[in-house]
């Protein structure tokens, strides 16, 4: 094993070479004549069990003190106006699934790959995940400054891309929301959540 690729063994390297056409395929890729195409936008990652609730209103507030339930450094106006006082009812328990975004993409193809039946997440999902990493600890959510993206409905049923980012310099989470119909692009390496 090579130190740089410690999790890859020789059997996996051989399987990879076989998939790209052996030594010839590798040479074509290295010379720029051929390229590897990623067929999917998302790669499944971790799963977190999330509780259900008959009624849930999250206690989101800007507070980075040591007593904060979740250290939140900033909330956008869109997040405040559309989610701060939202009451969720009859939210089923389930699994929150993380997916790594493999290449740059817009919301529409990301949502299509997740599927309409699984794309909607809830404030209780976000709140549960944030509480587990209230101080920027490692866990399901990315804490590198990259976005954790949740597709949620507002009071009126409109779907938003709600994102949480940890900023160590400000010692807290940034919460923001943009319409999922807006042609907003996300960079590879961000993380998308589904139920």
Image: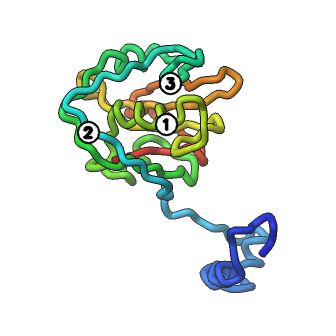
In the displayed structure, 190 sits above or below 35; it is above
Query: The residue tagged with tag 2: helix, strand or loop?
Result: loop
Q: Relative to residue 37, is residue 182 drawn left or right?
A: left
**Residue 65 spot, x, y in % from top left:** 59, 15
Look at the picture and state if 100 lies above or below 92.
below
> What is the C-alpha distance between the residues marked 3 and 2?
20 Å
Number of other residues with Cα within 10 Å of mark 1, as a class: few under 14, some 14 to 19, many 20 or more: some
Circle on res. 70? 3
For the question of whether residue 109 can be seen, the reply is no
Q: Residue at x 49, y 34 (%)?
A: 184
> Badge 2 is on which residue?
52
| Residue underneath mark 1 | 132
* Residue at image point 19% right, 31% down: 54
Classed neighbour count for the residue bearing mark 3: other residues with Cα under 10 Å, few (<14), some (14–19), many (≥20): many
Give coordinates of residue 124: x percent, y percent.
34, 32
Q: Tell me whether circle 2 and circle 1 mark residues in contact (CB < 8 Å).
A: no
Q: Give the mark nearer the N terminus: 3 vs 2.
A: 2
Alpha-carbon neighbours of circle 2 within 10 Å: few (<14), some, or many (≥20)? some
* Residue 88, position as x, y percentages in the image: 25, 27
Are discs 3 and 2 less than 8 Å apart at CB?
no
Name which quarter of the figure residue 13 lies in.
Answer: bottom right
């Amino acid at each position: 094993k090579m130190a740089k690729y410690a999790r890859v063994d020789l059997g996996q390297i051989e399987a990879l070479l076989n998939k790209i056409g052996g030594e010839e395929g590798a040479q074509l890729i290295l010379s720029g004549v051929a390229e590897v195409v990623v067929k999917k936008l998302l790669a499944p990652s971790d799963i977190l069990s999330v509780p259900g609730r008959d009624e849930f209103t999250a206690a989101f507030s800007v507070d980075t003190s040591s007593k904060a339930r979740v250290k939140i450094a900033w909330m956008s106006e869109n997040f405040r106006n559309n989610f701060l006082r939202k009451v969720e009812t009859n939210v089923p328990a389930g699994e929150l699934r993380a997916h790594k975004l493999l290449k740059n993409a817009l919301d529409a193809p990301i949502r299509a790959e997740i599927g309409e039946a699984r794309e909607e997440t809830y404030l209780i999902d976000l709140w549960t995940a944030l509480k587990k990493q209230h101080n920027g600890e490692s866990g399901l959510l990315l804490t590198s400054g990259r976005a954790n993206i949740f597709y949620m409905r507002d009071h009126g049923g409109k779907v938003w891309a709600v994102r949480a980012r940890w900023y160590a310099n400000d010692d807290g989470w940034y919460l923001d929301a943009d319409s999922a119909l807006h042609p907003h692009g996300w960079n590879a390496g961000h993380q998308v959540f589904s139920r």
